[in-house]
Amino acid sequence: EAGVAQSPRYKIIEKRQSVAFWCNPISGHATLYWYQQILGQGPKLLIQFQNNGVVDDSQLPKDRFSAERLKGVDSTLKIQPAKLEDSAVYLCASSQGPYGQYFGPGTRLTVT
Amino acid sequence: DQQVKQNSPSLSVQEGRISILNCDYTNSMFDYFLWYKKYPAEGPTFLISISSIKDKNEDGRFTVFLNKSAKHLSLHIVPSQPGDSAVYFCAARGHSGTYKYIFGTGTRLKVLA
């Protein structure tokens, strides 16, 4: 079974530029999560999808972050414009049912 | 408001000894707890979990203990091996039906050969 795929693995941009991350969850997983992990902290949920509907986006900075889940499968997370404090690892995870999540390798974003 | 706390940022243990990683939580509505292990440049991988109706769950060298009255859980690794060196996160799930997980800040475990 293929795991959660994410791309790119690394990205360096300047502040005020835009960036997009892509995630392909495990086949058949209805729930998809985007997390932000800042160095030294635990993953923080940004947005949670159930199929292609948003379940929770309470911690998503909506003035600059946006996310969509295409046809209930792949998802993209966009930041526009980026700030220095957006430097973090962005993790995508998926699950089917209530017992745990499978994480992708993450995208390390550096904003200079 | 940090609902899930891991107060020890790091821990060093000799190979073969027991590693004990601790996690505290504040929300009594959490009904499911998990431990994840994370190596550098990789995403977290699921290690072991426990439901709030149990006080212990064991899987090979890994045991998780839950003390609901103290709102505390711990992960025991016996015996510790150098390959266990990683960052360990505890996570808790709210009883809201949305399967939302809240993570602690992590503990970096170093097992010394």
Image (tube, coloured by chain):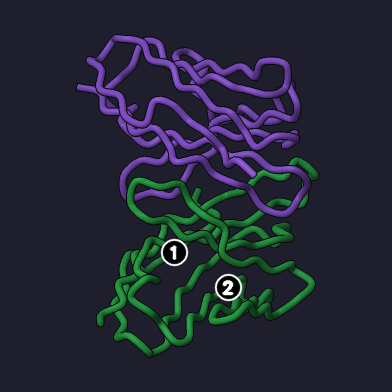
What residue is at 38 percent from the left and 61 percent from the top? B87
- The residue wearing badge 2 is B72
Please tell me which of labels 1 and 2 falls first in the chain. 1
| Residue A21 found in image quarter | top left
| Badge 1 element | loop
What residue is at 70 percent from the left and 61 percent from the top? B32
The N terminus of chain A: image quadrant: top right
Please state the chain letter of the residue tagged with numbered disc 2 in the rendered image.
B
Vertical arrangement, residue A18 with respect to residue B8, above or below: above
Q: Which chain is purple?
A: A
Looking at the rendered structure, the kind of residue marked 2 is His
Q: Position of residue B84 (x, y in %)?
A: 39, 71
Looking at the rendered structure, the kind of residue marked 1 is Gln
- The residue wearing badge 1 is B6
Question: Relative to A42, is B45 on the left or the right?
Answer: right
Q: Position of residue A108 (x, y in %)?
A: 34, 33
Question: Relative to B63, is B110 on the left or the right?
Answer: left
What residue is at 55 percent from the left and 78 percent from the top? B62
Q: Which chain is green?
A: B
Q: Nearer the viewer, residue B95 or A102?
A: A102
| Badge 2 element | strand
The C terminus of chain A: image quadrant: top left
Please state the chain letter of the residue tagged with numbered disc 1 in the rendered image.
B
Q: CA distance from mark 1 to mark 2?
A: 10 Å
Vertical arrangement, residue B2 with respect to residue B62, above or below: above
Q: Position of residue B80 (x, y in %)?
A: 40, 82
Question: Relative to B63, is A51 on the left or the right?
Answer: right
Vertical arrangement, residue A84 with respect to residue B13, above or below: above
Residue B53: image tag? none
Vertical arrangement, residue A112 with respect to residue B86, above or below: above
